[in-house]
Image (cartoon, grey):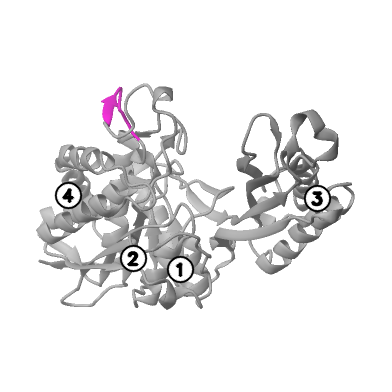
Amino acid sequence: MDQDTKTRILGAVDAGFDDQIGFLSELTAHPSTRGNEQSAQTFMVEQLVARDYTVDRWQIDVNEISALPGFSPVLGPYEDAVNVVGAHTSRTQKGRSLILNGHIDVVPEGPLDMWDSPPYDPRVDDGWMYGRGAGDMKAGLASNLFALDALGRLGLAPAADVFYQSVVEEECTGNGALACLARGYKADAALIPEPFAEKLVTAQIGVIWFQVHLKGLPTHVAYAGSGANAIEASIPLIAALHDMESRWNAPENRPADYAHMDHTLNLNIGKIEGGDWTSSVPAWCVFDVRMAIFPGQSIEAAKADIEAVLMEAARQNDFLKNSLPEIVYHGFQAEGYALSQDGSVNAKAAIGALESAHGTVNGDALDKAAITATTDARFFGLYADTPALVYGPRAEAIHGFNERVDLESMRRVTQATALFIADWCGLEDI
């Protein structure tokens, strides 16, 4: 690609940037928490239809994906889980095909009084857009779409098939991306603009979600000594899980991508419920756990270790040894994924194309990082033999209060994405 074409592409992104900010604001205004993504997906369909993409909107059928590698178990209904894909079909098919993937679901906003402004009333202040999902990852959905728009503004289109994906379920299972694979959407590479500050993610951890159910003997608090307090019984189990966390993080257990990190794998007690009445000793308790695993670490082996740790701790407790906990797996059962371990020709070429695009926009080398989170990249890299590049804008307070995304960073990512598409897919006239 010659310098003049690069310059024109960069300018085309700039020309559409005000519209891109407006698009991001409107998309962020949709409260698309899990189960409530339909209005946001309808907006995405309207935007894709207006751009003459071939649009596929479908409801995920658990029965179609439950036997596939990478599936995560679900507890709730799926009647409201809807994916959207917009397809560009190349006339010339001269280049390499591409998936542009992003997730529409966002995490719950938490207490509204903890926000400086309403989470679904996005605002721009000093170059940042604030709002739940603005960073994670609706800015990425915007950068993917407006990178394609920039090419169209020049009368150009990718010279290979491109599948623009807006998926659900990334924040809890990843089954939305898996459903896209099951539906037949495959390509030579995938790009996912998750908000990791314009760095290429070289490795990501896996995640396991589970619940621990404890049952006690109810009694009036005046006779607490004759009852078993199920909430208090959770304390030694949580302590045992943290001991396991330390063991898994030991230097001898770290793969090369994480050798420099002292504490990659984080255990989180995300929710705890128990009891029915202030003056009754609680007869039950349930606590929810998120535990990370390294790339290459077996999910089944990790689950076996978790179960052994919990049962051993329970047997050391006077109450729990007679009422062993029940472990229920739900949500994430995600393997880790390391792009750094993909030595294929496609992976090397895709990384090289992104390095070149980033360098053109930023004037410096592309930083690379192993992250302590998971993304949908694993589905493409592990189960579809497709290198998955995670590269997106700078954002802060994702999953927290006053989530925000750096709009200039989104502009740069959009420019780099447009250049990457032009290089990877090639260009043809519309």
The stretch of residues the image draws in magenta is 122-131
Q: Residues within 10 Å of mark 4 (few under 14, many from 20)?
A: some
Foreground: disc 4 or disc 1: 1
Identified at 49% across, 59% down, the residue is 173
Give percent across and percent down for residue 231. Answer: 71, 39
Q: Which amino acid does label 4 sit on?
A: Arg
Which label number is shown at residue 412?
Answer: none
The residue pinned by badge 4 equals: 8
The disc placed on residue 99 is 2
- Where does label 1 land, which residue? 380
Residue 247 - label: 3
Note whether residue 31 is visible. Answer: yes
Dot 3, how many residues are within 10 Å of its Cα: few (below 14), some (14-19), or many (20+)? few
Front residue (pair 359, 373): 373
Local SS, label 3? helix
Q: How far apart are marks 3 and 1 (CA)?
A: 30 Å
Q: Quadrant of residue 218?
A: top right
Q: Is residue 125 in the magenta section?
A: yes
Give the number of the mark in front: 2 or 4. Answer: 2
Place of residue 39 in the rendered image (x, y in percent of width and height, measured from the top left): 23, 50
Secondary structure found at label 1: helix
The percent coordinates of residue 301 (x first, y second) are 73, 67
Q: Distance between the residues labelled 2 and 3?
A: 38 Å
Compared across the picture, whether 104 is left or right of 297 comes to left
Q: Is 138 inside the magenta-drawn segment?
A: no
